[in-house]
Image (cartoon, rainbow, N blue to C red):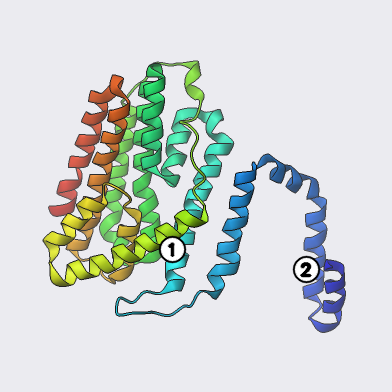
Amino acid sequence: MLTFAIGALALLAPPWVPLALGIIGTLLLSEKARFEGLVEALDNAEFLAVLKFLIVTALILPVVPDREFTAYHINPHKLWWIVVMVSSVGFAGYFMIKKLGARFGWWLSGLAGGIVSSTAVSVAAGRAAQQQPGQAHHALQAALLASSVMYLRILALVAFLNGAFVPALAWKLAALCATGLLLAWFVRPAEDPAARGPVGSMQNPFEILPALGFALLFVVLGVTTQLVQAHFGGSALLALAGVVGVVDIDPFILSLVQGNPTPAPLLIAAILVAMMVNTLAKGVYFASLARTIRRPALLRFTLWGLLHLPLAFFL
């Protein structure tokens, strides 16, 4: 089929088009064995996830309407682009864990897991500490590292959506990330050859239904945020940020960034409050499972969470 198409293009298109296709086709055929090996290395669920990812990016995204609907300025194309962007980041982190996690152990699992979901890593690490008390310190390190990466991940997403927020957020999120790295560094677990395994199995972050759920949550939180700002004022927005922080902060923060062209101090405070509550919640999730290391875990996550307050309201 490709050969037939190249022959037709040789008559109908500029010479460089069939030439380029011929070179690319030859290159792909020469690497056929390697591609087959990569596909065989994927289990069935991962292979289907890759196909679904290609469907929503290459097929669905280009045909989604790129215009605003309703009085709340909902743009389906921008909405689905955000879903694809967030899922792509998580997808990359997931495959890093699958490929390198068992080789580099807890640290890489924590760092790469933070790209996927720092909350999921905190829960998985807590369960690992519960089942293997001797690995509790390593598990706490992984949970702290994953939460540290969260700040950089969100900063990257914010920069992609609305660069105007970056100057106000960059140094604050960098400081919070550095704090988490220091807290992880000073855990100082004893050396243990068995501690090289990854945090645990993580669910593939790209599935159609969770992606649709993220889109729905993004729309709901975006509309709710606009209503709260218009009718209830700043205190209600901060309260909403605190409630959202217990669950998933990505849709809330990204809806704030996309829906407001300028980074007003109230918006920066709301973003940091959501992050603070989310950090405290992850500490509770981890400590509720890892009883042998509950006090050190709660102390670190609490101090880390409280650091958000001066950054949100005084600096």
- 100 shown above or below 260: above
Q: Residue 32: image x %, image y %?
A: 79, 50
Q: CA distance from mark 2 to mark 1?
A: 32 Å
**Mark 2 touches mark 1? (CB < 8 Å):** no
Few, some or many residues within 10 Å of mark 2 (<14, 14–19, 20+): few
Residue 229 seen in the figure: yes
Residue 277 to residue 53: above or below: above
Classify the position of the N terminus by image quarter: bottom right
Q: Secondary structure at mark 2?
A: helix
Residue in front for this viewpoint, 27 or 127: 127
Q: Residue 73 appears at what percent x and percent y? A: 33, 77
Q: Tell me which label, 2 or 1, sits earlier in the chain.
A: 2
Of the two numbered discs 2 and 1 in the rendering, the one whose residue sits closer to the viewer: 1
Query: Within 10 Å of the Cα at label 1, are there few (<14), some (14-19), or many (20+) other Cα atoms?
Result: many
Q: Position of residue 303 (x, y in %)?
A: 20, 35
Residue identifier under label 1: 82
Circle 2: residue type: Ala
Kindly identify which numbered label has been placed on residue 67: none
Q: Is residue 285 above or below residue 91?
A: above
Which residue is tagged 2? 20
Q: Residue 37 occupies which quadrant of the picture?
A: top right
Residue 87, given in percent of the width and then of the height, sits at 48, 55
Please state which amino acid type lies under the numbered disc 1. Answer: Ile
Q: Residue at x 33, y 68 (%)?
A: 258
From the viewer's perspective, is residue 306 above or below residue 233? above
Secondary structure of the residue carrying tag 1 is: helix
